[in-house]
Image (spheres, coloured by chain):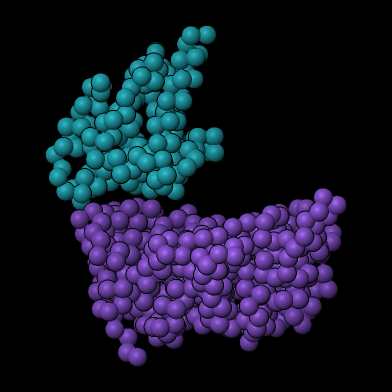
Amino acid sequence: MGFDIDKIRADFPILLRQVHNKPLIYFDNAATSQKPKAVIDALVHYYTHLNANIHRGVHALSQEATDAYEQARDGVKTFFNAQFREEIIFTAGTTHSINIVAHGFRSLLNPGDEIIVGQAEHHSNIVPWQMACDLTGAVLKVLPIDDNGQLQLDALQSLLGPKTQLVVVNHVSNALGTINPIEKIIEMAHQAGAKVLIDGAQASSHIQVDVSALNVDFYTTSAHKMCGPTGVGMLYGKKELLELLPPYQGGGEMIKEVYFQGTTYAGLPHKFEAGTPNIAGGIGFGAAIEYLNEIGLDEIAAYEHDLLLYATEELKQVQGLRIYGDVPLKTAVISFNIEGLHPYDVGTLLDQMGIAVRTGQHCAQPVMDFYGIPGTVRASFAFYNTKDEIDTLVKGVKRAVNMLL
Amino acid sequence: MSTEAQQDIIEEFALFDDWMDKYEHLIGLGKNLPLIDEHYKTDQYIIKGCQSKVWLRAEQNEGRVYFSADSDAIITKGIVSVLIRAFSGLSAQDIIDAPTDFINEIGLSDHLSPTRANGLVAMIKQMKLYATAFAAQNNA
Ligand SMILES: Cc1ncc(COP(=O)(O)O)c(C=O)c1O
């Protein structure tokens, strides 16, 4: 199937909007992606025709809703090529997914155990581990990045040891867009006897991920970054590990039998899905994955890479512009600053021109500290963006520079 | 009821009908903001809730409160400079009582929402806090 950009843009109703009386140019896709009509329709369809609580009703509606929700789980399972459907836990998103694992490890960690965390992580892949370490006496070790934002694998080798229980890193850095060599990291960690959690929030809609081939222990993502709704995401975990971890929250759905003398827990995946889940969200997540499958992740990746190369080349023409993490292996994210200018000023002026970029620390303060900067301007592209829009961005950046310098 | 200084600011900003002129003016104000003394740029004077850093200081002299400020971002500096013009030189009680709707009138209300990254609201709050502290001192 050819890649028909006009047809794709027509799938996203929000792209018709104006901002400050100018056509919206949305370059904040790393924060959240826009939603195609297919996903919006799935949500409307659910609330219009299927709404019922799931897994508990004998009535038709409840069963139809349950089927739709569980079908979405199958879609996610296939998309990530998990072996078993019960290895796919529906969560509220990446943050929730990581917290489930970090919380579970509190009962497995001993004082002196070590967790290795990447230096360029999102705060949600740092703080839950700090909390787990505080409670257990385990120690957090930082895997450093080099000047280009790439994890230093030789440092990983020396950090890994008999005390290492876990290695937690992102697949793609949200602050820089750099893709980490997770295959190698997983292999090295496993050789040292450690488990690996990969935060895939920035990868899932850009890189085809095969959790079985990766042999990864835990993989997390958020649907809202992959054209799906907010408030839903995935925790993938190897079955035997998910069985080992204690539940995160107690409540309905996650139990088998409840007596005041004691309760037995439900099997996977329900053990980690306490309470009425985000049913519409799960179904919308399924619709998003179907939509991505229809276009094809390889097509998406190729188109976005082309945008990245074009934008990188054009932005480099701007005098004094520095790109952080300017390496070949990247998703379509450009994190930059202009000499002498504060990212906030640049972002504010771009906003006035109808261009949405993110400015600031991107929830990754250690990365900004590493570079000694207050933040960056981050333009992140998706497959519904165009080179014309990038031209407008580059013009906008030049205009902002003229106004500010 | 807006103060005289606020009225001046409203009239000045009414001259711009285009966002670029307005921001160029703000940037100009930012560049001309008299700088706060370097040694006051400490955590004690920093305003939280800003994506850019803002340092704000106040002193009271013969019954009037004077502010000085700085920021690492120019547009934020421009905004601070407008606020300083609106509030500096008034008595502590006048600052406490001063309305803030002139912000809407000069078309900066975009920046007024408390979740906005530049923390305009936090700056106004801090100015009023300083004034409240001076007023308490004066009444003691
Ligand atoms: C790399 C990375 N990890 C974690 C998160 C947190 O995701 P969420 O806010 O959807 O839980 C994000 C999103 O900002 C991210 O980019």
Tell me the shade of chain A: purple
Find residue B46 and report its horizontal and vertical position in percent.
49, 38
Q: Quadrant of residue B36?
A: top left
| Image: A175 above or below B106 | below
Residue A348 is left or right of residue B130, and the answer is left
Q: Residue at x 76, y 53 (%)?
A: A134
Chain B shade: cyan
Is residue A43 visible in the rendered structure shown here?
A: no
The answer, for residue B43, to whether it is visible in the render is yes
- Viewer-proximal residue, B46 or A253? A253
Is residue A102 found left or right of A43 in the rendered image?
right
**In this view of the protein, which residue sits in the foreground, A164 or A34?**
A34
Q: Quadrant of the N terminus of chain B?
A: top left
Counting from the top left corner in percent of width and height, residue A51 is at: 48, 61
Vertical relation: B35 (above or below) A370? above
Tell me the residue at 32%/36% (across/down).
B81
Picture coordinates of residue A349, whole percent (x, y): 29, 54
* Left or right: A404 as drawn, with respect to B130: left
How many marks can you see? 0
Residue lying farthest top?
B140
Front in this rendered view, residue A295 or A130? A295
- Vertical placement of A332 versus B105: above or below? below
Does residue B89 appear left or right of residue A242 in this picture? left
User: Residue shown at 49%/20% (left/top)?
Assistant: B133
Question: Which residue is pictured at 29% across the width and 66% down the height?
Answer: A13
Tell me where residue A331 appears, x and y as whole percent. 46, 76
Q: Residue furthest front?
A: A59
